[in-house]
Image (cartoon, rainbow, N blue to C red):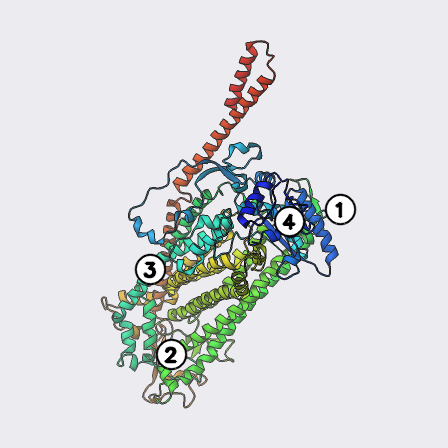
């Protein structure tokens, strides 16, 4: 018998480990250290705890058995009922083979929280690994890795150490079979299953363990989720393996959290590659595939950002060659052109030269390079999606997800469905009674859900109409303030900012605020609607929520951009016959575009909404968990290890909800829409997205590593429904960019003029050609500027006509104020451009998608090789096993009469061997 003396903790743990392997337990002061004892019921544990002062550990008190899961609870007013549930639940957990150990509330920091520690022994792990078909290694891989590429030294600064990038050797794997344990490479049963697999198995048991007595009929009461929802337990989580800022003292602990923080979660590592294999090993495949997708998306953004920067640089370098802007700014051309008022009564006549600055700004984004960039982005989207499929296939093989069926984990009935659906019917497959939702109830819920969706979408449209009305009303105010008089400070600003620009900026800011407010409500509305429909499975719930949330967010974020791109300036009319919003009585004239086009306003709208969302999102992501958990980190650093236990540290962190990754995907997909749907108006959008994503990766990594409890490891072979959403956005982006180049940009009218004006390759005279003439005397009195509004230079007796942006016949013509033939030529050119661009991009897209296989040939070869080896090894294994059985039976029963029987037995063995 070994006694615990005043030795160091490590020496004590070594002795305890050797003494408890056989579960016999040594005694101290007459109390046993048996592993099945509960800490709250035996006073002997108190003295043991004093002898093991380090509570920052992931092991039971014996220092041998690993803590795979932790449940916490507190005593409250409804204590008796909850105690009974816990008693039955924990008794059933022990019947399932799990080992439990309780930490009394007196040991907790707050003095009221109990912690139930759960350990899964080998027998339980092996049983459920067989049930879940978890793949485990059976042979070291004999396929050589790709050879070193030339100039590998260039990428060396971006690489991480080998033990971080590849924490595990490369093996061929096969689904675990409990009856063939000696077939697999099992060196140590305690470490054969990694912690992520262990907590996944334990959670699988917790999700199905009942908490009813055997003599009761309410057998639908089961699962930790229902116990968490009714307050029986306050939290359920696996443990982090150490503190993130230092390694664990126990050498048996992997300290993977520390490695992730050091090499991945710090912002100073922003230029380094991500340790995807370590992320997958620690957090599971579902989180690993998210960071793999985010990292790949960011890598591909680099090429789009470079091309967009080149396009922008071309616009800046061709600044001086812009004949159109030079004519607008020329006092003899633009300064002599008098434009018609842009609104009724409050707006005066103005000179075209006042838009000089905005015309130069528009040229930065509306130039010949923009067409090329729009086509490039259509092809880039296809390359991104196709190469991601290949990367995803490679990860699916490397992470043993090739034969993984999501139905094994996702197609499980939700506890909420079981609780709310009291009707039951026979399942034809399982031949068991299961809850279901009657058709009448389903129809009613669907109608209510559909009506709610329509109402909230209508609210978005109403808000957009309100913003448009604001633009129309405020434009007149800005126009009356920003007159070109040299006396006040406002006029100085007015010489730099046009009324159109001021209206566009303020309206975009207001629209962004409205988007953020509506976004707050839409998240809750989408969840409420999805809960109302009572989806049966978790996969169905996520898909329905994804569809509704993306639909809300799509309309919320993009509707204002769609208005500026495709509606503003398209239904204006002309002087004397203007179109009005809400009817002629309201006198809110529809908005006009600048003489240089509406593209610069679309650029302003896109920059404010996209950049504002990214900045606000990053602030929220960083500050929210930081404000919640700053005291946890501070307390963890200040308190010694014997006072602040590992389970209390993790309990004080934020819970990572089941929909945590949903919001991360949603944020990135909305950004993907911004850089694809409207990228023709702002080539620098991919650069903004690239900078944001570099920060996003590290912020998300920091949150997962330092601010969240360790999530339960779960599998996923792809990014799910988001893949289809990305495909739809990619196809839609080709159409939107083609229409932006045709109808929002001024590119097509300029090209038509260039090739039909007879000026050769010169754009001289384009401005005069693109403006129509109207007689001031024919402007209705309701539209004429009020007295005192017109500038000093305007003389009604000298200036008899004004210009407006359109292609119409001048006054005195037999077809005055009707569209000219040039208008129809330009319209035909626009439609032809849309058709040609769409067909070219779509043909290239489909050709690229066809020529690039979804699964790399190397991965196909490795999959075939692995399947062949599995069959071969299983065959040899069965043959050897059969030989051993036959040999044993021959030795036990040696009374064979003659050699014939032996030969016959050998022949049977050979035939059976071939059949196997």
**Label 3 residue SS:** helix
Q: CA distance from mark 4 to mark 2?
A: 72 Å
Q: Name the residue that disc number 1 marks.
A: 217
Image coordinates of residue 23 in percent, x first then y, are 62, 40
Q: CA distance from mark 1 to mark 3?
A: 66 Å
Q: Name the residue that disc number 4 marks.
A: 101
**Label 1 residue SS:** loop
Depicted 794 relative to depicted 243: above or below: below
**Label 4 residue SS:** strand
Image coordinates of residue 774 in percent, x first then y, are 36, 80
Observer-side mark, 3 or 2, equals 3
Within the image, what quadrant is residue 374 found in? bottom left
* Cβ atoms at labels 3 and 2 below 8 Å apart: no
N-term mark: 4 or 1:
4
Q: In this rendered view, identify the residue nearer to me: 72 or 793.
A: 72
Q: Name the residue that disc number 2 marks.
A: 498
Q: CA distance from mark 2 to mark 1?
A: 76 Å
Observer-side mark, 4 or 2, equals 4
Mark 4, residues whose alpha carbon is within 10 Å: few (<14), some, or many (≥20)?
Answer: many
Mark 1, residues whose alpha carbon is within 10 Å: few (<14), some, or many (≥20)?
Answer: few
N-term mark: 3 or 2:
3
- Res. 306 mark: 3
Q: In this rendered view, identify the residue nearer to me: 628 or 548.
A: 628
Mark 2, residues whose alpha carbon is within 10 Å: few (<14), some, or many (≥20)?
Answer: many
Q: CA distance from mark 3 to mark 2?
A: 32 Å
Q: Residue furthest left?
A: 760
N-term mark: 1 or 3:
1
Would residue 302 be visible to someone looking at this image?
Answer: yes
């Amino acid at each position: 018998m070994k006694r615990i003396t005043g030795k160091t903790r490590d020496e004590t743990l070594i002795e305890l480990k050797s003494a408890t392997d056989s579960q016999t337990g040594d005694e101290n002061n007459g109390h046993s250290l048996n592993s099945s004892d509960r800490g709250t019921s035996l006073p002997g544990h108190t003295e043991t705890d004093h002898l093991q002062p380090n509570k920052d550990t992931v092991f039971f008190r014996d220092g041998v058995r690993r803590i795979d899961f932790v449940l916490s609870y507190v005593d409250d007013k409804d204590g008796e009922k909850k105690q009974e549930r816990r008693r039955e639940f924990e008794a059933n957990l022990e019947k399932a083979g799990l080992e439990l150990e309780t930490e009394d509330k007196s040991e907790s920091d707050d003095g009221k929280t109990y912690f139930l520690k759960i350990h899964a022994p080998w027998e339980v792990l092996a049983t459920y690994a067989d049930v879940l078909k978890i793949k485990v290694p059976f042979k070291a891989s004999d396929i050589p890795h790709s050879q070193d590429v030339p100039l590998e030294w260039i990428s060396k600064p971006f690489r991480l150490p080998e033990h971080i990038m590849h924490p595990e050797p490369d093996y061929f794997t096969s689904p675990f079979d409990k009856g063939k344990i000696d077939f697999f490479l099992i060196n140590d049963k305690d470490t054969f299953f990694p912690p992520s697999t262990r907590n996944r198995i334990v959670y699988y048991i917790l999700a199905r363990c009942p908490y009813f007595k055997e003599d009761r009929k309410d057998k639908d009461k089961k699962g930790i989720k229902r116990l968490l929802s009714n307050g029986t337990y306050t939290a359920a989580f696996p443990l982090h393996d150490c503190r993130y800022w230092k390694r664990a003292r126990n050498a048996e602990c992997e300290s993977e959290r520390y490695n992730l923080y050091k090499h991945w979660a710090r912002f100073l590592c922003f230029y380094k590659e991500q340790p995807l294999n370590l992320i997958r090993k620690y957090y599971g495949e579902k989180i690993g595939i998210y960071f793999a997708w985010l990292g790949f998306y960011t890598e591909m953004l680099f090429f789009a950002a470079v091309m967009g920067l080149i396009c922008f640089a071309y616009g800046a370098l061709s600044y001086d060659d812009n004949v159109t802007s030079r004519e607008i700014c020329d006092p003899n051309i633009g300064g002599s052109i008098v434009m018609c008022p842009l609104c009724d009564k409050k707006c005066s006549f103005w000179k075209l030269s006042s838009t000089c600055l905005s015309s130069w700004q528009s040229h930065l984004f509306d130039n010949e390079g923009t067409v090329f960039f729009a086509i490039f982005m259509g092809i880039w989207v296809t390359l991104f999606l196709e190469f991601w499929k290949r990367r995803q296939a490679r990860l699916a093989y490397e992470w043993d997800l090739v034969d993984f069926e999501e139905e094994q984990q996702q197609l499980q009935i939700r506890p909420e469905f079981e609780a709310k659906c009291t009707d039951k019917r026979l399942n034809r497959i399982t031949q068991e009674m299961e809850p279901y939702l009657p058709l009448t109830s389903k129809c009613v819920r669907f109608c209510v859900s559909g009506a709610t969706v329509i109402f909230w979408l209508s609210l978005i449209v109403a808000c957009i109409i309100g913003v448009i009305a604001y633009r129309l009303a405020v434009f007149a105010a800005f126009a009356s303030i920003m007159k070109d008089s040299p006396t006040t400070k406002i006029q100085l600003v007015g010489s730099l900012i046009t009324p159109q620009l001021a209206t566009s900026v303020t309206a975009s800011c207001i629209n962004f605020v409205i988007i953020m407010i509506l976004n707050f409500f839409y998240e809750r509305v989408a969840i409420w609607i999805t809960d109302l429909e009572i989806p049966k499975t978790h996969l169905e719930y996520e898909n329905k929520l994804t569809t509704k949330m993306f639909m809300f967010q799509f309309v919320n974020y993009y509707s204002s951009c769609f208005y500026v791109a495709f509606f503003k300036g398209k239904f204006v009319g002309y002087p004397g016959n203007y179109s009005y919003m809400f009817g002629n009585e309201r006198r809110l004239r529809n908005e006009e575009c600048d003489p240089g086009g509406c593209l610069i306003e679309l650029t302003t709208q896109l920059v404010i909404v996209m950049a504002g969302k990214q900045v606000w999102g990053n602030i929220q992501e960083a500050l929210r968990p930081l404000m919640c958990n700053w005291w946890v980190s501070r307390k963890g650093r200040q308190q010694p290890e014997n006072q602040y236990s590992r389970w209390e540290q993790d309990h004080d962190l934020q819970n990572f909800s089941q929909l945590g990754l949903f919001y991360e995907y949603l944020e990135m997909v909305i950004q993907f829409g911004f850089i694809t749907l409207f990228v023709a108006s702002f080539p620098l959008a991919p650069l903004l997205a690239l900078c944001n994503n570099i920060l996003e990766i590290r912020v998300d990594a920091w949150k997962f590593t330092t601010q969240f409890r360790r999530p339960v490891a779960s599998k996923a072979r792809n990014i799910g429904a988001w893949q289809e959403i990305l495909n739809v956005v990619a196809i839609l982006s080709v159409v939107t960019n083609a229409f932006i180049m045709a109808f929002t940009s001024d590119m097509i009218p300029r090209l038509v003029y260039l090739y039909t004006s007879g000026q050769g390759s010169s754009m001289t005279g384009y401005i005069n050609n693109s403006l129509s003439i109207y007689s001031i005397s024919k402007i209705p009195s309701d539209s004429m500027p009020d007295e005192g509004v017109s500038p000093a230079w305007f003389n009604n007796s000298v200036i008899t006509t004004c210009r407006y942006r359109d292609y119409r016949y001048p006054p005195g013509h037999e077809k005055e104020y009707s569209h000219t033939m040039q208008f129809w030529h330009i319209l035909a050119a626009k439609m032809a451009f849309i058709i040609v661009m769409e067909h070219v991009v779509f043909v290239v897209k489909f050709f690229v998608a066809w020529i690039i296989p979804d699964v790399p040939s190397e991965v196909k070869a490795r999959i075939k090789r692995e399947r062949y080896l599995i069959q071969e090894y299983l065959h040899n294994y069965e043959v050897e096993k059969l030989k051993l059985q036959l040999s044993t039976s021959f030795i036990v029963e040696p009374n064979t009469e003659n050699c014939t029987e032996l030969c016959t037995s050998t022949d049977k063995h050979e035939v059976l061997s071939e059949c196997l």
